[in-house]
Image (cartoon, rainbow, N blue to C red):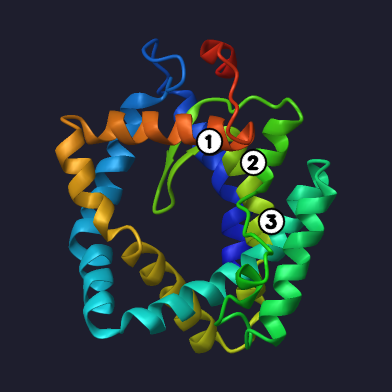
Amino acid sequence: MVVRNTARAILPALLAVLAGCATTGNPADPFEPVNRKIYAVNDTLDRYALKPAAEGYRDVVPLPARTNVSNFFGNIEDVWTGFNNLLQGKPREGFSDFGRFAVNSTVGILGFFDVASDIGLDKHDEDLGQTLGRWGMGPGPYLMLPLFGPSTVRDTAGAIPRQLVDPVASVERIPVRNAVRGLRVVNGRAQLLGADSALDDAALDRYSYLRDFYLKSRLNQVHDGNPPREKDDYYE
């Protein structure tokens, strides 16, 4: 319940803080000063807590086991992906996602094994932020969310319903629920360990690089790999 209440409150509370911090710099990032401060806090937490935990997890847990864990959490996401594919008017992809979930939850033993990909049911990556974008909603200002990282107003609004229907949140035993959440976070961070050196090598300003990469990536995802050429219109 605490997580759900937090999810409901985070967007309006954050916007209230940002409202007094607007600047006339990058039009996609009008709240850059406060976003940079939040990024600095997130980066510190990552460097001294999350990244070391992910490195320890990687060193201790064999690759096949980490793959099984990733498959398990990915299987849960297939339901949400399928739902959003249907909302985007892509029934073929949506029913394929539901088929993936059915196959992997049974033959794949609760999703630990990705049998669906082996039989031609490809994995997709869709969320409510992409759905809103597909139906014409602009991304709004770029936001750096505490703990969660890069986002936009649209993507943050789209993420809140996902948190509310997260099946992990319905686990009644609190220690088990927290353990599963922690495993998901650490496993996800472990998958990104290779990107650290690339980010360090590519960017003098990590914040700007991450922001621009995120916005371009989301634009590409919303338009299924065919973004419009008029990039500036995307931020209006």
Evaluate if marks 1 and 2 touch, with contact meaning CB atoms under 8 Å apart.
yes
Decide: is 74 above or below 216. Answer: below
Quarter where residue 201 is shown:
top left
Q: Nearer the viewer, mark 1 or mark 2?
A: 1
Secondary structure at badge 2 equals: helix
Q: Nearer the viewer, residue 75 or 32?
A: 75
Residue matched to label 2: 129
Seen at 55% across and 32% down, the residue is 220
Disc marking residue 2: none
Q: CA distance from mark 1 to mark 2?
A: 9 Å
| Marking on residue 218 | 1
Front disc: 3 or 2: 3
> Looking at numbered disc 2 in the image, what kind of residue is underneath it?
Gly
**First of labels 1, 2 by sequence position:** 2
Q: Residue furthest front?
A: 119
The amino acid pointed to by label 1 is: Arg
Asked if the residue at tag 2 contacts the one at tag 3, i.e. Cβ–Cβ closer than 8 Å, the answer is: no
Quadrant location of the C terminus in the rendered image:
top right
In x, y percent, where is residue 47? Answer: 19, 57
- Amino acid type at mark 3: Thr
- Which residue is tagged 3? 81
